[in-house]
Amino acid sequence: MTKEFNTTGCCNPAMHYMVDTSKKLAQIEELIDRGKYFTINRARQFGKTTTLKALFRNLSERYVVIPISFEGVGNLLFSSEESFCTKFKDIVETALKFSFSKDKAAIWKETLQTDSFDELSDSITEFCLQVDKPILLLIDEVDKSTENQLFLNFLGMLRNKYLDRDLKGMNSTFHSVVLAGVYDVKNLKIKLRPDEERKYNSPWNIASDFNVDMTFHPDEIITMLNEYEADHHTGMDKEFISNEIYKYTSGYPFLVSKICELIDRRLEKDWSERGIQMAIKEIVKGNSGTLIDDISKNLENNEELRSFMYSISVNGQKYTYTLIDPVVRVADMFSYIKDVEGKTIIHNLIFEECFQQYFAVAYERQNAGKISVTQSEYVLNGKLNMPYVIERFQKLIHNEYRKEDNTFLERQGRLLFLCFLKPIINGTGFYYVEPETRNGGRMDIVVSFAGEEFVIELKIWRGEKYEVEGKVQLAEYLKTRNLSEGYLVTFSFLKNKTIQEEPEWVEHDGKRIYEAVI
């Protein structure tokens, strides 16, 4: 059977092109060998289920591996303590029947008494003592049950058995328990009864930290491309493509695989920079799975998260990265942000564009009529006239927005530019914000259109010194991209500052810079 890229469900190396994750698996297996209990808590479509399946295959000779999930089990499981224990017994029995330890299913069935957690605990000990191998329990989609007190009681029982291993021996309970889900089970926010406020509980405080890097780096992405290229002989530059994919995804597993899948199936195997960019445009449209859909849902359902991501995405704020802050913790849990030198930045360029699209469209809906742009005005013979784009944007701000207060413009200016730019390049071009240049006063936008690249630096006026620094920074950045021309748009909100009437070309350090002050 011909292999393919897979972005739905877990991946199987016999059926799918996969990144070589053997080094990551070795780190996880070391934790298991040491008898650790831990949680693989990562964002959606981060490869958690695929990782559990790989552990099942790799460890079934040395362990009795029991892979279970609480997804889709129905409400009966949580109707009573007896129902939970009985259902748990059935789930494990089924898992054993389809495992490499089929002979252990009968022992489990005969051993288990399941009227209460106390009986279940004693029965687990008896089963573990009868089995000739250490037992590994893998529980997937664990956060689907975390608001239920019975499930938390179950985790508490496992915790107590873990703590008793010093007296009763390592084989008196599961050798290792691995939970997988989006939420960190060590800090569950639960609701014990409908009339109670949510409160924090820690039924899993014996869990070891899980610090394995689950993202795919270029030297790992290329292992998947090597396998694909051996089958298809496209002639792609595998090293270049793996680095480009990483540049846009920061190694987010689903995004890596989705780009490859789209290029292979829908973009005529265009393994080039353009092919990658076109795949990203498809992803950002939101038609490529639930991951992108979840961005808008999560922002709509959490106003604090929405404001936090707006300030980072649009206003360029860099907050201290600390998981003590609950909003930072939520953004990190969804992998919307990451830690770079102690500051929060958006996790990857695809998410960057998704957030900007979300906020830009929201602004457009609220201000219908103020921004009306058609591509034909700005494209001549297939080439984008970027100086004219900036000139027209300056006039738009002067005509439509200068009556607004300066606080509004300082807060919304860059969003307005993105709203103005988006319909001009839509369908043909692509843009992203360079995260390294993002801060409260500066933002570099890279636009790719019809084979040409444009770098636009957006700055907020901070005085003459900073205006010169803007040219220096832009010229340096242009060197890194081998470009001779760039664009500098400065938002000025000082009443005593004379506004530059017309944009103009200036020279700096061998680079031509088209400068506009708004």
Image: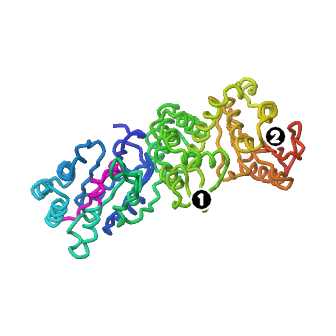
- Asked if disc 2 and disc 1 are in contact, CB closer than 8 Å, the reply is no
Using the image, tell me which numbered label, if any, was put on residue 340. Answer: 1
Q: Which residues are magenta?
A: 132-155
Using the image, tell me which numbered label, if any, was put on residue 5. Answer: none
User: Does 103 sit left or right of 393 as displayed?
Assistant: left
Residue 350 in view of the camera: yes
Check disc 1 and report its element: helix, strand or loop: strand
Residue 390 in view of the camera: no
| In the image, residue 42 lies in the stretch drawn in magenta | no
User: Does 498 sit left or right of 401 as displayed?
Assistant: right
The residue sitting at 15% across, 55% down in the picture is 114
Within 10 Å of disc 1 (Cα), the crowding (few <14, some 14-19, many 20+) is some
Residue 14 rendering spot, x and y as whole percentages:
33, 45
Check disc 2 and report its element: helix, strand or loop: loop
| Three-letter amino acid code at the position of disc 2 | Ile
Q: Which residue is mark 2?
A: 518
Measure the C-alpha gap from mark 2 to mark 1: 32 Å
Q: Judge by depth and name the residue closer to the eye, 282 or 400.
A: 400
Task: Say which label, 2 or 1, has the lower sequence index.
Answer: 1
Q: Judge by depth and name the residue closer to the eye, 275 or 321.
A: 321
The residue sitting at 49% across, 35% down in the picture is 262
Residue 417 rendering spot, x and y as whole percentages:
72, 37
| Three-letter amino acid code at the position of disc 1 | Val
